[in-house]
Amino acid sequence: MNLSELGTFLRSRRDRIRPDEVGLPSGPRRRVPGLRRDEVAQLAGASVEYYIELERGAGSQPSEQMLAALARALRLTGDERDHLFHLAGRVPLRTGPAAHVHPGMSDLLDRLTGTPAQVITDLHVTLLQNPLAVALLGSHDAYRGADASFVHRWFTDPEARLLYPPADHPTQSRAFVADLRAAAARRDQRDSDVRTLVSTLLDRSPEFARLWADHDVAFRRDDRKRINHPALGLLEVNCLSLFSEDGRQRLLWFTPALGTDSADRLALLAVIGTQTFP
């Protein structure tokens, strides 16, 4: 761990980013060419005092979650992100080509302030959520290991299915399996992540094994879903997808289905936030 070098590295990355690249105004009175410390702190969800201490090379060792947030805020490349974790004496939370949020995906997510949106991998591991997505779907930050994949949770944890009405479960299961087959076909046959996920699900879920044997192949591009929200009730939404060039990441955003009353209730998400309901 080298907190002094960490601070120097953070300053160098902060200086190179123009405010308009991260959706901030670039007024004529700015004293620095890049971002200010308070702006980086805001983008990373940290206190200004804490971030200033990091740049000074002081304070405590930052957590993996904070380092990941700083990497997103500073638009670090995959190599730069790994270097940041190395300087902090931490191991990156996830490895592999899909571990780092694609900068274009992150930029788009920052601009989608009025609709629930999130970035996931092709194995349905959530990488980044905006506040409205957390309010709609719950936070996915706590999941680790195999459970980081929503497909894994869907077939192994009954609570994961509470998001959808029971009548929709067979359709969702079939769509998840077909999407996973499509993702596996795009990856190298030696890819350990997808092989491990498929092998685990074949062992643990008879439903998955039966559907996998059907050999259906289809990416989930545009879906119409019904979502059970604990406060807003049953919402009918369109789930739209934008894929990265290599197909490893996708940006999902949710819009109210036409002809339903979901638009008015989705508008309440910003008011409700992420508070817990009985």
Image (cartoon, helix red, strand yellow):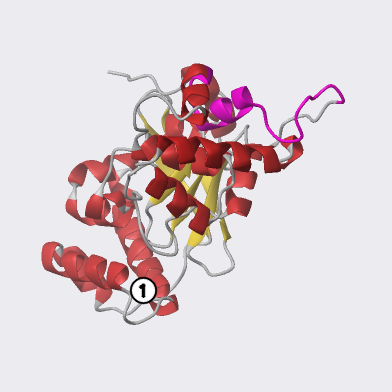
Where residue 107 sits, quadrant-wise, is top right
Rendered location of residue 182, percent (x, y): 42, 73
Q: Nearer the viewer, residue 234 or 134?
A: 134
Asked if the magenta segment contains residue 42, the reply would be: yes
- Residue at 59 percent across and 36 percent down: it is 11
- Residue at 34 percent across and 42 percent down: it is 1
Rendered location of residue 112, percent (x, y): 63, 38
In the structure shown, which secondary structural element does the residue marked by tag 1 occupy? Answer: helix
**Marker count (numbered):** 1
Where residue 73 sits, quadrant-wise, is top right
Rendered location of residue 186, percent (x, y): 44, 77
Q: Nearer the viewer, residue 183 or 237?
A: 183
Q: Is residue 143 left or right of residue 120?
A: left
Magenta part of the chain: 28-48
* In this view, 260 is above or below 269: below
Mark 1 highlights which residue? 181
- Residue at 37 percent across and 70 percent down: it is 178
Rendered location of residue 220, percent (x, y): 47, 62
Kindly tell me whether residue 26 is visible in this rendering: yes
Where residue 270 sits, quadrant-wise, is top right
Q: Is residue 216 left or right of residue 5?
A: left
Residue type at tag 1: Arg
* In this view, 25 is above or below 257: above
